[in-house]
Amino acid sequence: MTDGTTDLSPGTGSRGTESADRVADVLLLFARAEHPLGVSKIARSLSLSKAVVHRILQSLTSRSLLQVVPGDSTYILGPAATSLSARAWSQMDVRTIAAPILRRLREETLETTTLSVLVGHHRIYLDQFESRQEVKMVVELGPRFALHSGASSRSILAFLPEPFIAEAVRHLRAADPDFDADAYRHELEQVHSKGFAVSLNERNTGAAAIAAPFFDAAGNVMGSISSCGPVFRYGEEGHEDHVRLVINAARAITAGLAGDA
């Protein structure tokens, strides 16, 4: 039995193993959490003393695996955790499977194609294949993007459980008191039904995108792909063909992940 005050310094035997287990349990708790977590909540969830939890949080925060929510005493996953997630994704088959599909989609649409993956309650761009045209859209790989805005985000959000959608609604309502939550939820239902999302001048002025989700073998949404470029090239003419190409590419990635390709 222990007194709940095992330190976090490297060690051998059961004490070192127990300390490592506790750190891992805390990180996994954050990975599953739908909201920021505080010391008391973590202590209750893992049956640990607040002193132990506090030391673990301090250690993880010092390494940027966690970060404090500004103006609050709760914590969320930090940039180092996001980097680990991105590295894990890059080592999975999804990037290898998606690459030839996205290259082909670029040649078919003449626009930049992107690969986004779901990381916690955000998404990141994992890969892109730039348009060969002089005027084009280029994305930044690695940073986290919210799930509430943009075609690549909404095409993921529409296939996630309700708590994710409720969180997106809260963020949008906080940013705009006149935000129409019912209309937004209806839009997500349309994305879910049709299998794609479109954004025009949404996250970046002058930018447009058509995005569709891809899934693992169990049917869980893993991320999305997009064809993106300047908004003046995303008019009604050829729109249906463009959408079809993006959806078919996303389905090809899903099939590849399931081993059907």
Image: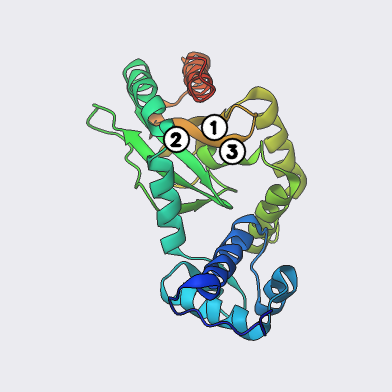
Q: Which mark is residue 156?
A: 3
Contact? badges 2 and 1 (CB < 8 Å): yes
| Residue with the most extreme right position | 182
Report the residue at 42% width, 37% height from top: 92
Residue pointed to by mark 1: 198
Q: Residues within 10 Å of mark 3 (few under 14, many from 20)?
A: many
The reply, left or right, for residue 171 in relation to residue 222 is: right
Q: Can I make out residue 72 in this image? A: no
Camera-nearest residue between 217 and 209: 217
User: Residue 61 placed where, x, y %?
Assistant: 47, 75
Report the residue at 40% width, 25% height from top: 97
Camera-nearest residue between 42 and 193: 42
- Mark 2 residue element: strand
Circle 1: residue type? Val
Q: Which mark is residue 208?
A: 2
Q: Residues within 10 Å of mark 1 (few under 14, many from 20)?
A: many
Q: Pick whichever of labels 2 and 1 is earlier in the sequence.
A: 1
- Mark 1 residue element: strand
Report the residue at 48% width, 21% height from top: 256
Quarter holding residue 156:
top right
User: Residue 89 placed where, x, y %?
Assistant: 43, 42
| Residue with the most extreme front position | 13
The reply, left or right, for residue 56 in relation to residue 162 is: left
The vertical placement of 195 against 52, above or below, is above
